[in-house]
Image: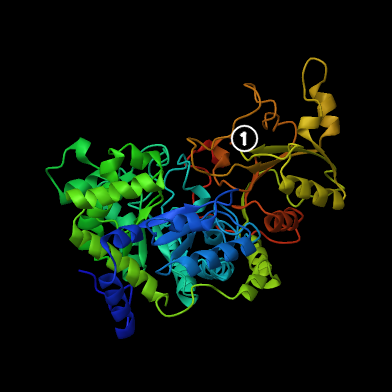
Amino acid sequence: MVDLKGKPFYLGEEECRWVEETLKGMSEKEKVGQLFCEILWDRPGDGPEMLLDGLEPGGVMYRPFPGKKMWEYTKRLQEKAKIPLLIACNLERGGSGGNGGLTDGTYISSPMGCAATDDPQAAYKLAEVACREGGAGGVNWTFEPIVDIDFNPENPITNVRTYGSSPERILRMAKGYIDACRDYDVISTIKHFPGDGVDYRDQHLMSSVNSLPAEEWYETYGKVYQELIDYGAPTVMCAHIKQPALCREINPEIKDEEIMPASLSEELMQGILRKKMGFNGLIVTDATQMVGFTCSMPRHLAVPAAIERGADMFLFTINRKEDMGYMLNGLEKGLLSRNRLDEAVTRILALKASIGLGKKSAVPQMERLSCLRCPEHLAVAKDVAERSITLVKDREGILPLDAKRIRKIKMVQITNETLPENGLLPEIELFKKLLEQEGFEVSYFKDGKYPGENYSLAEYKKETDLMIYFANMKVSSNQTTIRIVWDDFLGEDSPKYTKDIPVLFLSFSNPYHLADVPMVGTYVNAYACNETTVAAMIEKIMGRSSFQGISPVDPFAGLWDARL
């Protein structure tokens, strides 16, 4: 059963009594409601109270919201909820940035940007900003730190969302993040168990696979999870990722077709996390609308099976009434046992008690919103940018730039983001403006001519002293690749004339672009695309600030020609 006084809950007598009495006072339907963590978008018609109609969930996750609106929604939710809610957010890049947080919060950097400083204090500071700003909006649970290992440069999800490819560095950074969460009474989550970063596919679109042999898994992912569990991580998110070797270790008779992703695997949740690793905290599934979950079992069976096989909370619903009905029906038919129901709800209540939700207001003072993008938080973003930007190579000695030596610059934008009407990222426009303030003549490649039948390379060279590539290819869900796609099959916008015109390639969101531009001689990784990083990049390439970043991954992606 659940050890309420032990790691990671550490509840006192009063908190234990609140958990036990609250559980006793709940009906079965109320217990089933607690199993769900719902999702709330900032969309017209998506009022918060609708989530409390019928079965009241145990938690809600916010997608990006303005801080004041988030606070208002928290107030409305918590005042109506019978049991205080866990309110979650993806706070992986500070108060803003990435795919969660506050739209008006402070974007510090990506996890890999923090890791490039090689200083756990950077991860602590990022999490401190995340907890202060998210907490001001009412968030008490963050689905971070991400502790996946970025082994495969082709993985479309991990990338800069990770702390890199070294388990040791990941552990240092993750502990820094967890420490800040503890200091600010925000629950942290280590994810995505059993570990992303091996496969080149996306668990949002299928059940992906961590294919490492068991021995290698224990030396890498296992080491990370075991040490962080021992460190007191309160929550583990189980992903829609299969780990065949571990499943066979727990159940040697298991057939290939019976191997489930962690979110539905008794072998991984109960056999590895609970029994082998001794995890006493809360297990939450990853988002259950993902294909990796929906394709694994019929949904009416998968919903109760996720809890019966070891998860304590079910993340999101497709149709709220239908999915909750599946859970209730599963309980009635014995697909979900009452023992597992009580155990799961006990952990949910214990998690709430561990941050004082049983005895203090779950709604922060509105005045706390004044911390959003405050000078102190902006200074953290500036410091991380200053210490993380990494010079990978400068073969031709282009850097530092000098407007007297190199004056005419053509810029090429590479991005997979949705663009404003003018077709340009705000960050590249800022970068162009800052270059012009340095005395350079800057134009966009897309606005001019390129060598062909009616325009010679010699003419092009007279008008171009340097090509600068501004790359912001972000990792995101629902994709299968983060490779560069040029405008045409001959790559007219690619660095094809590197032997004729110097090229500076600046990557703001992906450390592996050398795989697609190995011919480039001067290459810099920045790990985040925001105003702070753009300003810091200008200082670096102008030579007023040294490059301090230490790459958390192999930026050459294992390719010998990329090093040339």
The residue identified by callout 1 is: 519
Name the element at disc 1.
Answer: loop
Label 1 crowd bin: few (<14), some (14–19), many (20+), radius 10 Å: some
Q: State the quadrant of the C terminus.
A: top right
Q: Position of residue 173 (x, y in %)?
A: 47, 65
Residue situated in front as seen by the camera: 43 or 454: 43
Q: Residue furthest bottom?
A: 13
Amino acid type, residue under disc 1 in the picture:
Met
Q: Is 383 on the left or on the right of 311, as rendered?
A: right
Looking at the image, residue 485 lies above or below residue 197: above
Q: State the quadrant of the N terminus.
A: bottom left
Using the rendered image of the protein, determine whether residue 478 is visible from the camera's viewpoint. Answer: yes
Q: Position of residue 430 (x, y in %)?
A: 77, 50
Seen at 77% across and 55% down, the residue is: 542
Residue situated in front as seen by the camera: 35 or 131: 35
Looking at the image, residue 33 lies above or below residue 201: below
Using the rendered image of the protein, determine whether residue 564 is visible from the camera's viewpoint. Answer: no
Q: Position of residue 497 (x, y in %)?
A: 71, 29
Looking at the image, residue 127 lies above or below residue 515: below
Q: Residue furthest top?
A: 453
Q: Residue furthest left?
A: 253
Quarter occupied by residue 383: bottom right
Seen at 33% across and 36% down, the residue is: 295
Residue situated in front as seen by the camera: 355 or 510: 355
Q: Is 136 on the left or on the right of 224, as rendered?
A: right
Seen at 74% across and 58% down, the residue is: 539
Quarter occupied by residue 409: top right
Exactly how many numbered labels are in the figure? Answer: 1
Looking at the image, residue 454 lies above or below residue 510: above
